[in-house]
Image (cartoon, rainbow, N blue to C red):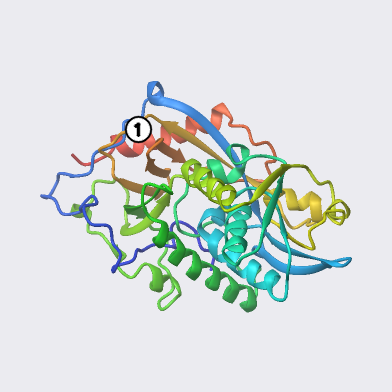
Amino acid sequence: MLLDRRTLVGGSAALALTGCATISRRPGCSTLPPVHIDEGRLIRTVAGLRPYRESGFVVRRDALGDKALVHNYGHGGAGITLSWGSSRLATDLGLAGHSGPVAIIGSGVLGLTTARLVQEAGFPVRIYTAALPPETTSAVAGGQVSPFGHYREGRVTDVWMAQFQAAMAYSWERFQMLAGDRYGIRWLRTYEEVRRAAAPGSWIDAYYPNARLLRAEEHPFPVSPVMAFDTMYVETPRFMAQLMSDVLEAGGTLRLRKFENVADLAGLEERLLFNCTGIGARALVGDAMLIPIRGQLAVLRPQPEVRYAFAGDAGYMFPRGDGILLGGTFERGEPDPTPTPGAIARIMASHRDLFAGFRC
């Protein structure tokens, strides 16, 4: 089945956030404060290009002359979520039997998590990148730790699905270890408008066992049905900045450089290279299956009393330290990472209607 934010629902009962917004209330009145949607509160708009492959992300080792090139790209809307786990699969594949320095191509979340895992294994790292983290897709991602928009139903194999599950398991573990202000990771109660239920007994149950459908009197949203669960959210600008700091403090080096094709990589002095170029892999390695999917965000001024998240037909709302994120576009094949006024207006309008419809 296609996994999206409306099928991947749930949270970790053992690790549920204490003190998060509750769902108990007197009938007819909500304890959740509505988000104030007003153009005067809009502080910025952003857009990013998700590197999407219908057949799922790539973790593969290729020979490049006398070098090894390990690919780690194509995660669609699940790049943050799967970053640690996919990078763990990639480093396990590349580091076996290796000695000497390692090159990382790309400084998005996959590049930085790969670099940290390589360093933790005891190898020196150099990152080659055409853009620094503030300009990468990862830095403008919403940051919900829940896989979304990263493959198409019927286009993946059982072998790939096992790879995905292994990546998800390690990422889930690693993000829990990093929760806190330093990396900008926190648990939030999340409400999802549910279009269809997850398959019974699926891997989803392992991560979100406390997910439950709410009765109408248990939530204020003017939609139904709604599921409640707890999951983690990543304040991506802070997370990316801290990862880069960690890499540099551990002795990693950084070089600004753009590669046009695989032949350019062959001239590097390192004998082990990790391709973590995201959407750039389409041109770099000629992967025609990789397409951009544009996601646009409107960011409102922070509203500290909003301590929950929502996703549904109206789009999604995540509160972060740097503002309230409103999103909802999944624009297939759009290569321009520029916000469009029409899309931003629709995002604002759909959320305005949602929160205006709050029951008390």
* Residue nearest the viewer, comparing 146 with 179: 179
Residue drawn at x 58%, y 31% as measured from the top left: 339
Instruction: Provide residue 104's location: percent of width, then percent of height.
Output: 70, 55
Whether residue 186 can be seen here: yes
Q: Quadrant of residue 85?
A: bottom right
Going by the picture, which residue comes out furthest to the left?
26
- Amino acid carrying label 1: it is Pro
* Residue nearest the viewer, comparing 134 with 326: 134
Q: Is residue 304 above or below residue 62?
A: above
Q: Quadrant of residue 173?
A: bottom left
Residue topped by disc 1: 302
Q: Quadrant of residue 268?
A: bottom right
Residue drawn at x 75%, y 69% as measured from the top left: 61
Instruction: Provide residue 18's location: percent of width, then percent of height.
Output: 23, 57
In the picture provided, is 216 more to the left or to the right than 231?
left
Instruction: Provide residue 346's location: percent of width, then percent of height.
Output: 48, 33
Could you say whether the residue bearing mark 1 is in a helix, strand or loop?
A: loop
